[in-house]
Amino acid sequence: MGHVLTAVVVDDAALTLEELAQACAVEPDWVVARVRTGILLDDSADTHGDNAAGWRFTSADLVRARRLCQIERMFDANDDVAALVVDLSEEIRRLRVKLSAAGVK
């Protein structure tokens, strides 16, 4: 995979498995493994069948996948550790937004 797809985050985007993998500069198997373990995609997605080609990923999934890739590569972390770091980072962002909305600095 020599080329990295640069994308603009759009709320209604629906990337295919191959497009998400290309955008993250990983093999589709990397994405499939993280979907199967629940690290990518939410529980409402039909990820139990063998039709991975039918999966669609949002811009939020793209951002999360890129963060996972970055953590795994930078720190040679396994997927569970990377997911924990990304989850904690997302929670910190949510809490900061709530504090800001409440007028706390």
Image: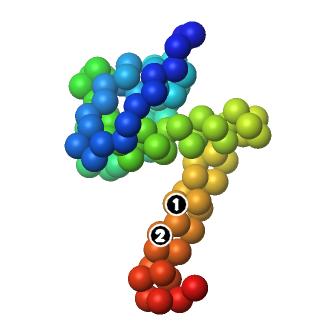
Residue 46 visible in rendering: yes
Query: Residue at point 48% right, 45% down?
Result: 64
Give the crowd class for mark 1: few <14, some 14-19, many >=20 residues within 10 Å: few
Residue contact at pointers 2 and 1, CB within 8 angstroms: yes
Choose top left, top right, bottom left or bottom right for residue 76.
Answer: top right
Residue type at mark 1: give it: Glu
Residue type at mark 2: give it: Arg
3D distance between C-alphas at marks 2 and 1: 6 Å
Residue 29 visible in rendering: no
SS at mark 2? helix
Q: Which residue is mark 2?
A: 94
Query: Residue at point 35% right, 49% down?
Result: 42
Q: Which residue is mark 1?
A: 90
The quarter of the rendered structure image containing the N terminus is: top right
Q: Position of residue 24 (x, y in %)?
A: 51, 28
Spot the residue most to the right.
75
SS at mark 1? helix
Query: Residue at point 60% right, 35% down?
Result: 69
